[in-house]
Image (cartoon, helix red, strand yellow):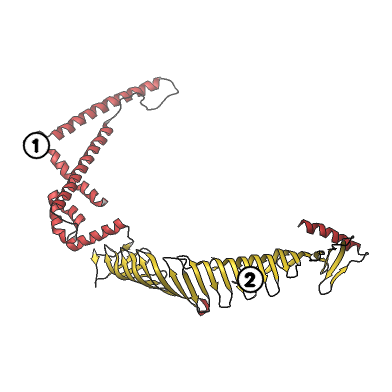
Amino acid sequence: MKKIIITAIFLSSFQLVFSQLGDAYHAPNTLQLSLDRQRRMNAADNAHYDNMRSSNKSASSSSSAGISGDYNAYGWADYSGMRRQEAAGRAIEARNKAYQAKVDKLEALIKARGLKRQPQYHAQLVKAAKEAGYDDINISVMFGFSEKSYEGILVKNQLAENGSPYIGSTKLSCQGDCEETLTANNNIVYTGNTLNGMPHGKGTYKTKATNIEAEGTFANGQMDGVINAKGENYTATGTFKMGKPVGIHTIITQEENNISGNYIMNYDNLNDCSYSSSDGMTFKGKMDATCSFIKGEVVYGSGIKFNGYFKDNGPYRGNWIKEHRIMVGEFGTSNDGTLYLKYGYLDNQKEKKITQGFFAPGMKRTGFQNIESADGTVTEYYYSAPDVEEYICIYFPSGTKLYLKARADGDNYIGIKNLKDDPNNSYPIRYIKNNGIENLAASETELIAKAHSMLKKQLLK
């Protein structure tokens, strides 16, 4: 549209000049007289300005030595440039008014004659434009040279107005057996019915970058109706409404290790989605629009069951159950893809022990651990690194307490034993795996001192 306006302004400027010259044989040329008078005034102004400037030069040479050069402090101002700009502005305003008058007249003629800006009205539109004062060049820009070329102009205007990324259409409407091939700047190629230069009706689009093909019905450039799609590793069927998925969609995927997956997506209620795979895994619960697990229950082919929240399609926070083992807490995934409990508690119902604390990949113990046995014994561990014991505290139901420091005597533990009803209360001990506990000999003064020192540090932790 901007190109049309600029062309009309340049062409109408020639008509404006010719109309202003007047008839030299029958009437005074008022424009020429005005221009001559303006030139005389400018010449007089400039002459006066030159005289003032030369006098200022001589004055400056005889004045203070600190001021020199060719300058004019009080000379007569030269307004001729401003007058020319003002005249040019009036000329542009006149051309704009003349062009707008043509636009208004053309619109009035179109309305009065019941015309529409459609290819079948091409001849009548051209006639109306000529009556409105447009020349052949402007008319060809607006309406083309034929019905077909005008249709192409209308298609381009529609695409520009709608911000469509598609190019290649030459028809306003291409329905039924008619097909066009359109391309978009994101490497999409569409073949099928079109309307106003966009996919509309039955068609197929393909993406070169991701090698996806979708076939179905479209409306105003959007998927609208049942769509069958396929990519390198999946096929999908579902209904769309103006580009948005609705209802039930079925997606079949080919995954790693020849495993196939089957998604049932309910886009009307994403809390009611499901997934199953050929290796026995099932999921029921909430997914997002990209088919990622959000919340629900998954059962693996190995028999493991998880109920809770998911992150990156893996268990995140919830309950993990397999046979006699129950884990509750927050989960992570090791580099090899193995799931482990990061923090929470492990209920081993077979061993009748509940372990609470932190874990590292591979379910290695780290940080603080608390293990409660069925007989009431509570054991507290502190691990300085995964599976590296540093301190152990054991609380027996009888009231006896053991405080042990690992690797304090070679591979042996050194510590203190507190007996509930013993007046001496604390006994330095050595713990040897497979041999049990033994009291330190009175001669082992260095180890005894280490045992008491260790107890203070352990209690602080």
Q: Residues within 10 Å of mark 2 (few under 14, many from 20)?
A: some
When asked about the image quadrant of residue 152, the answer is bottom left
**Left or right placement of residue 35 versus residue 322 in this view:** left
Mark toward the start of the polypeptide (2 vs 1)? 1
Please state which of residues 372 and 361 is positioned toward the viewer in this rendering: 372
Give amino acid for label 1. Ala
When asked about the image quadrant of residue 246, the answer is bottom left
Image coordinates of residue 313 in percent, x first then y, are: 53, 68
Q: Residue 276, labelled with which disc?
A: none
The residue at which mark 2 appears reads as 326
Toward the left, the furthest residue is 26
Give amino acid for label 2. Ile
| 54 versus 317 height, above or below | above
Q: Residue 24, labelled with which disc?
A: 1
- Residue at 62% x, 67% y is 328
Toward the right, the furthest residue is 443
Answer whether labels 2 and 1 touch (C-beta < 8 Å): no
Q: Is residue 373 visible?
A: yes
- Residue at 21% x, 39% y is 91
Q: Say which of marks 2 and 1 sits in front.
A: 2
| 94 versus 169 height, above or below | above
Q: Check disc 2 and report its element: helix, strand or loop.
A: strand
**Left or right placement of residue 53 versus residue 371 in this view:** left
Query: Could you give the CA–CA distance between mark 2 and mark 1, rounded to whole angstroms?
Result: 109 Å
Image coordinates of residue 276 in percent, x first then y, are: 49, 75
Q: Residues within 10 Å of mark 1 (few under 14, many from 20)?
A: few
Q: Check disc 1 and report its element: helix, strand or loop.
A: loop
